[in-house]
């Protein structure tokens, strides 16, 4: 077996062991069900979508999949799934231009969600969206 073949087999075994590689259709996750509230969240650093991307799937029945899932789900419940209606927090954010693009796609109370917004920096994003896009927490 060549080095490349061994590395490929080892990588596949690692993905299978961690649950990142699953048999069956790619859409077999719990968030495909019409019931339940879920959002696929991504945050991209930089002015273009090809920058540093972080993401996760937030599930809210029960809260999981996100470092601050319970808090994010509670904020979304209060805002009826509308991220733009989450009350902005009063915090001091530096006047530093380090743009981040926030995106949420999914379903909330049976309705589709497709939220996109660019913020001047991570502090401003977190102040305006609460725990929803706080993926580094």
Image (cartoon, rainbow, N blue to C red):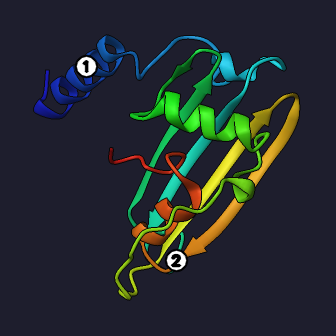
Q: Residues within 10 Å of mark 1 (few under 14, many from 20)?
A: few
- Residue at the (65%, 68%) spot, across then down: 117
Residue 5 location, x and y as percent?
Answer: 21, 27
* 1 or 2: tag closer to the N-terminus: 1
Picture quarter containing residue 33?
A: top right
Q: Which residue is mark 2?
A: 48
Residue 73 is left or right of residue 125, and the answer is right
Visible residue check, residue 78: yes
Quadrant of the snapshot with the N terminus: top left
The residue under label 1 is: 14
Q: Nearer the viewer, mark 1 or mark 2?
A: 2
Looking at the image, the residue that sits furthest to the right is 111
Q: Residue at x 65, y 49 (%)?
A: 104
- Between the residue at mark 1 and the residue at mark 2, the CA separation in whole angstroms equals 32 Å
Q: Is residue 121 above or below residue 95?
A: above
Residue 71 locus on image (x, y percent): 51, 34
Can residue 28 be seen in the rendering of this structure? no
Please, is residue 55 above or below residue 43 in the view? above
User: Residue 27's spot in the image, x, y percent?
Assistant: 68, 23
Q: Secondary structure at mark 1?
A: helix
Residue appearing at x 79%, y 39% in the figure: 80
**Label 2 Cα neighbours within 10 Å, binned few <14 / some 14-19 / many ≥20:** few
Q: Describe the element under mark 2 as helix, strand or loop.
A: loop
């Amino acid at each position: 077996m060549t080095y490349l073949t061994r590395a490929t087999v080892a990588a596949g075994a690692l993905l299978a062991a961690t649950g990142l590689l699953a048999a069956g259709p790619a859409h077999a996750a719990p968030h495909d069900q019409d019931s339940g509230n879920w959002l696929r969240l991504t945050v991209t650093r930089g002015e273009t979508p090809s920058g540093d991307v972080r993401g996760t799937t937030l599930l809210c029945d029960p809260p999981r999949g996100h470092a601050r899932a319970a808090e994010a789900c509670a904020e979304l419940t209060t805002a009826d799934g509308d991220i733009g209606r989450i009350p902005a927090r009063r915090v001091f954010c530096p006047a530093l231009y380090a743009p981040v693009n926030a995106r949420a796609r999914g379903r909330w109370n049976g309705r589709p969600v497709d939220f996109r917004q660019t913020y001047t920096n991570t502090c401003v994003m977190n102040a305006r969206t609460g725990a929803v896009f706080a993926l580094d927490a």
